[in-house]
Amino acid sequence: MGKIKLLQGNEACAEGALYAGCTFFAGYPITPSTEVAEYLARRLPLIRGVFLQMEDEIAAMAAVIGGSLAGQKALTATSGPGFSLKQENIGFAALTEIPCVIVNVMRGGPSTGVPTGPGQSDIMQCRWGTHGDHPAICLTPAYVQEVFSETVRAFNLSEKYRTPVIIAFDEIVGHMRERIEIPEPGVLPVVNRRKPECSFEEYLPYDDREGDVPPMANFFEGYRYHVTGLNHGPDGFPVNASPRIHTDELRLMRKVEANRKDIIRFEEFLTKDADVIVFAYGVSGRSGKTAVEMARAEGIKAGLFRPLTIWPFPEDEVGALSSRVKGIVVPELSLGQIIFEVERCAKGRTRVEGIYRVDGDPITPAQILEKIKEVR
Amino acid sequence: MAFDYDRYIRGGKLPHIWCPGCTYGIVFKSLLRAVDALKIPKNDIAMVSGIGCASRLPGYVDFNTLHTAHGRALPFATGLKMAKPDKHVMVVSGDGDATAIGGNHFIHACRRNIDITVLVFNNFIYGMTGGQYSPTTPSGHIATTMPYGNIDPSFNIPELAKGAGATWVGRGTAYHAAALDKLIIGAIEHKGLSVLEIINACPTTHGRRNKFRSPTDMLLWMKDTALPLSAFEKLPPEKTAGKFPTGVLFKKEAPEYCETYYGMVDRVRKPAEGRG
């Protein structure tokens, strides 16, 4: 039995990071994610970890990458405007393959928007926010317990695949308090980056000969190598106009694409015999579950598909569902973003209907139930 | 005996990208001599840069090297230094990289007084992109984006660093290479944030558009306008126009950021450890 606590999602995220071995946080104050920073400002010094409040969001992302390159597991947390500012350096971490975890507690609106309200309208930015082609892993927990466990998983995936991992949850999940159990150390797996076994002279930081994820040497450990945001060869040095750029970018994408089974996680609730599926994540997934229960109570065969990994998108699963149901309902706190992915995977085999809301309140189970009845 | 630069240069990575007449090669060699004089193990040095001509330097040297995004070298370096406070972290930056796009990081790194050595290669122009005006382009100079003469007032980098809280501030030039060795040594040895502005020349995108007929003319300009601080201070104000002081311009003792941080860590951990 682990420790039982009453925590809000943001605090559970910080606890999850500590459980995963995070010893480095850099951030910048922003609503509604600030509690992640505040919690770690208290806790990290107690374990000789580093807590930095940087001069801006860009600097926070940069410091996190620096900390990780020096061997620490590093985290930053932000929200919409800050997430926009971090994008360039997220791309840097993706291309240079430096593990790090970015929390985006989603609020509403473009620009300053609705800082204190929930949103799910950054979800495409989580996939495509930084410029250029790049792999993306994004996790979408909906319960405080899940924020904890998915944060642990985010660090594990980041270390395993040497890539930035984003955790995106909305303000409601971030601020909601729920009972959670923090397991004893060792109960949840904790993954550490694979280090080189060869000598410094033989080390190639981006060697692709033995798999898509090369071992990573930390700085100051005797492997003096070059890290650059320019496209680079196996030795880490820039290459220009070379077929290598194409093959290496394919490798970066393959790290995620070829490991979908390992990365994609979801909850299926009463989907086996369902005529109508609610596809929803985060707080909308919670409303979706209640809506499904309400529908079942009325004898309507509804089910819930709730992704915990939104990127890479669960294409096969949504594709399979769409070939056997009458409709898929997609509630989201945006004016329609993730529905495009659902439609892409459904390929016209079923009816796909969205429910959108951006007024600072969550979508209610009643709203979803109404739509379930409409498409059934 | 001639200095053996090869011990510090990565095999096969030269020739460098810098244009003929560029003074960065002079500074590059000075930097290697300074590191060698201090006998710092290569494994213990991280050299971090942003974007621009100067920022390509780390690729050539046999240290832990990190070539980051435009203007962002200092926060990356801050992450490295905080994670490994016993290691040497150096930043190579340019006038645009450090004081335009990276200006916010520059002043805050100075304010924290974290033990990082910042070398700002000031060539008064955005060279890599072809000669646009920077925050240090002199008034009236021609740049591709100031075709009628620069109307922007310019930054004085040492004054900016000092004002922001840097505890070691110096200025050298590519012309005064022997003196530059000593300045770089002093900057690295200082415990705290040190900023060394190094006056450089970009004949290709700055000089030739501004009446410098050759790279040599630009070096001679440095020779004629740079004055050691002690000499500069003795001149009446009317005679300092167009001149600039060199050497260690400012130095003070102040708590270093990593020491302060880990001091706090020790302080807050003690009660917890006492309880067992």
Image: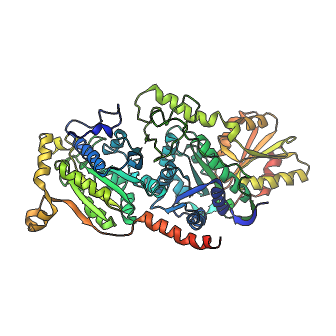
A123 to B82, vertically: above or below: above
A247 to A81, vertically: above or below: above
The answer to which of A242 and B267 lies nearer the viewer is: B267
- Expressed as whole percent of the image width and height from the top left, the position of residue B124 reads 23, 50
Image point 45% across, 34% down: which residue? A201
The answer to which of B208 and A221 lies nearer the viewer is: A221
- Expressed as whole percent of the image width and height from the top left, the position of residue A267 reads 77, 47
Q: Quadrant of the N terminus of chain B?
A: top left
Q: How is the image coloured?
A: rainbow
**Quadrant position of residue A144:** bottom right
The answer to whether residue B136 is visible is no
The answer to which of A7 and A367 lies nearer the viewer is: A7
The answer to which of B265 and A166 lies nearer the viewer is: B265
Q: Quadrant of the C terminus of chain B?
A: bottom right
Image point 91% across, 49% down: which residue? A299
- Expressed as whole percent of the image width and height from the top left, the position of residue B27 reads 24, 46
Q: Is residue A304 left or right of residue A127?
A: right
The answer to whether residue B188 is visible is yes
Image point 46% across, 37% down: which residue? A200
B108 to A269, vertically: above or below: below
**Quadrant position of residue B168:** bottom left
Q: Is residue A293 left or right of residue B146?
A: right
